[in-house]
Amino acid sequence: MRLAGRITLSLAAASLLLTGSARAETVVKIGAALSLTGPAAAYGAQQKAGILAAVDEINKSGQLKGVKLEAVVEDDASTKEQGIAVFQRFINKDKVAAIIGPTLSNTATAADRLAQDAGVPVVAVSNTAPKGITDIGDYIWRVSLTEGQVIPGALKRLQGKLGFKKAGLLYGNDDAFTQAGYTVMKAATETMGLQVVGTQTFAKPDKDYTAQLTALLAAKPEILIVSALVENASGIVAQARQLGWQGPIFGGNGFNSPKLMANAGPAAEGVYVGTAWNKVSTDPANQAFLKAMAARKHEPDQFCAQSWTGVAVIAEAVKLSGKGGRDDVKAGFLKVKDLPTPLGHFSFLPNRDGNHEPALQVVKDGKFQIVP
Amino acid sequence: MGQQVINGLFLGSIYALFALGYTLVFGVLDILNLAHAAVFMVATFVAVALVGHGLHILLALPLAVLFAGLLGLVLERVAFRPLRARTDSNISGLISSLAAATIIEAVALEIWGPNITRFPFGTLPEGPANQLQLFGGTVSRLQLTIIAVAVLLVLALTWLVKGTRLGREVRAVAESPRAARVLGVNVDRAIAAAFFISSALGGAAGVLYGLAFNSISPDMGRGVELKGLAVIILGGMGSMPGAVLAGFALGLTEVFVVASLGGSWRDAISFAGLFLILLVRPRGLMGAAVTREA
């Protein structure tokens, strides 16, 4: 048992002695603002499952002696307006100790300000926009790695395996997300010393990328690095293979969807994507997570693992500070260090962004598989 | 270089095929059928559904094309014929075709959903075994087939319009519906025939497009619609050889703009070129001089 655990134990024992009753339980409420409807509903469903399971398991384990976690899940409808309404309810009516969410970065940029002003700690579990989240203020924390953290880590790992030196870049330049992904990729190629032999762009409505790909391939790259949403990504991958490209393709977070394999089929084999969660990790914390989700008959994805981690981080903060008030949780976050989670050993960076090792996955036999 | 020419010819053949049907109705009725892109889309979904039910694509393609043709007949009956007697039938027909397009798209959205679908894997032989090396580029059999089908349909349509009785009737109606009627032409039948052929061609373009790019969704026609419009204007309103020529020209221009200047410039340069050509040749590449006065 780690030192922190021992302190909590003694604290819990002390409080037990003081109250003189084993039944005196403090309830720490966690508000979860999730997109259960709207365009991001697929993510919200995974997050809800992860949060409820984590709260359940932590309460059952009894690791927070004298403290019971309670999750209040509300739907932010994938919109800013509804997200703000939910945050107001959490802050003023439910009096939660901490908030998890909201699902989308776009919603977070608006809703998180309310929590910052009210002094309620927020843990973002799926916001990946590099700017506009944790820089809102000292109550806003983040578990999810930003694109800026996943892409360089995964790309470096891939270079270590394949040893490429020349890259061709392709990205959608009419979308904020794919454009941001490209900026990160370009910076990563510079720090890694890769030679960029060509850069091409496309737009979201495009279906034909052969002109761009032909121009890129003519410059003889050793890897294609692509920032695209999944609909475009499938077409790009299929057409690159059709043009005879056998080499590796590295994609941004937009590639991180089973739709890629559904639409590109065999052409998707050999596509590499970074991910925050290594689902085949044999780390005990990940195995415990997988077991808990299997017991609930739920097939978890990255979003599920991240939201589970969000609850685990809050529980650890409560444990470390010994109390469950809003500022206690925030003070506890400062002390979270190398916490074992499904995502790996987790700490916060000085800017309150999360930090853990990203993983690399490859499409093999029609499925994403972790590259060891 | 060789590869880019192949890419351009391929893209151009799809534009040409789409624009061919577009320009046929335009030439006959002097109105734009904005539902052409919706027919293009529906035919693709019908073909996907048929293949999904186990039909071979060589059977599914003609059935989907037939369906598109019938849909064209329905469109003509519902959206155009009731308005034909009106003095402003060009504008009201345009609007009602826009309404028809919106309705068809909404129905497709309801039936097939907004997600992108594709033909089942193995619909056509894929993979390196079905690729050929030509002029220093790689071309798949599918691409060659699409280019060949496009050229074949162009020839067939030209023969139909120039060499058959039906074609003569359609051309007579295009010249003057009243005179055609006086000469014993069944005007309604000729117009319906033009719609059937036009929509069937649009449907064929849709299925081939779906096979080529495998990115099928209810809004797939929108991008092609504007390109198709540009192609028929460039080719000379109502001119079929012009539409084909302009289709290939647009495809090649787009590919070379993307390759040399980047994707962002594609539409800007293509449409600037269109503008310039229209300044020099207001009737388009192969447009005939105006002989009819309204």
Image (cartoon, rainbow, N blue to C red):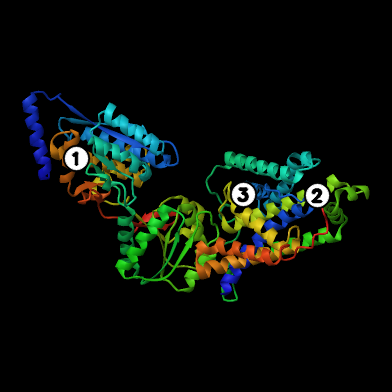
Q: Is residue A143 depicted above or below A156 in this figure? A: above
A142 w.r.t. A236: above or below: above
Tell me how many marks there are. 3
Badge 2 local density, few (<14 within 10 Å), some, or many (20+)?
A: many
Residue identifier under label 3: B48
How far apart are the alpha carbons under marks 1 and 2?
74 Å
> Which chain hosts label 2?
B
> At numbered mark 2, what does the secondary structure look like: helix, strand or loop?
helix
Give the residue drawn at x 18%, y 33%: A325
Question: CB atoms at circles 1 and 3 under 8 Å apart?
Answer: no
Residue A324 picture quarter: top left
Name the spot of residue A126 as percent of width and height, x first: 33, 45
Q: Chain of mark 3?
A: B
Q: Nearer the viewer, residue A240 or A89?
A: A89
Res A52 label:
none
Examine the image and state in which quarter residue A154 appears. Answer: bottom left
Badge 1: few (under 14), some or many (20 or more) residues near its Cα, within 10 Å?
A: many
Residue carrying label 1: A330
Structural distance between the alpha carbons of marks 1 and 3? 55 Å
Q: Amino acid at mark 1?
A: Lys
The crowd level at tag 3 (other Cα within 10 Å; few <14, some 14-19, many 20+) is many
The image position of residue B214, as x and y in percent, is: 56, 55
